[in-house]
Amino acid sequence: MEWTTRKLCYPEGDEREIEFTPPFNVLLDLNGTPLRLPLPSEKTLAYRVYSVRKHEGRGETVIQYLLELVPAHELRGFVR
């Protein structure tokens, strides 16, 4: 039997197991859920997937989605 585990990897080093595949270049909140646009403020904590790593072992595959924190100056374009 083959197991697949998906994890969000935050820039601070934290990891969170998830049940879905997050899309590339979409703004995500702290839980990995896509943010609704327009944003209420550029002070929103927003992440985006910038890389994916896949580790295959015996009977298990781990897919890591590496996230980066989106700076406030980039979020200004998404604010009302």
Image (spheres, helix red, strand yellow):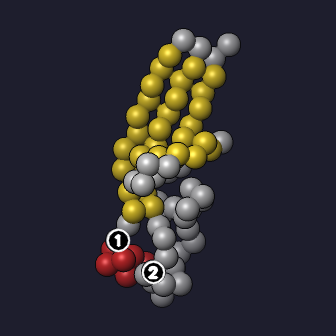
Q: Residue furthest left?
A: 73
Question: SS class of the residue under badge 1?
Answer: loop
Q: Quarter holding the N terminus?
A: top right
Q: Would residue 32 be visible to someone looking at this image?
A: yes
Q: Residue at x 57, y 71 (%)?
A: 36
Residue 45's tag is none
User: Is the residue 13 above or below the residue 69 in the image?
Assistant: above
Estimate how packed mark 1 is, as few (under 14), some (14 to 19) or many (20 or more) residues with alpha carbons within 10 Å.
some
What residue do we see at 41% from left, 39% from top? 52
In-front residue for pair 33/13: 13
- In the drawing, what numbered circle is on residue 43? 2
Q: Would you place residue 67 above or below residue 6 in this image?
A: below
For the point 36% across and 50% down, the residue is 50
Measured as percent of width and height from the top left, residue 79 is found at 45, 83
Q: Specify whether 18 is left or right of 68.
A: right
Taking the view exactly as shown, the residue that stands out farthest to the front is 13
Determine which residue is flagged by label 1.
71
Q: For mark 2, does the 10 Å Cα neighbourhood hold few (<14), some (14 to 19), or many (20 or more) residues?
A: few
The answer to which image quadrant residue 20 occupies is: top right
Give residue 65's position: percent from left, percent from top: 46, 43
Q: Which amino acid does the dot numbered 2 rest on?
A: Lys
- Confirm or deny contact between disc 1 and disc 2 (CB under 8 A): no
Which residue is rendered at x = 62% and y = 44% of the image? Answer: 18
What's under tag 1, amino acid-wise?
Answer: Pro
The answer, for residue 49, to whether it is visible in the render is: no
Marks 1 and 2, Cα distance to the nearest angstrom?
Answer: 9 Å
Identify whether 80 is placed above or below 33. Answer: below
Kind of element beneath mark 2: loop
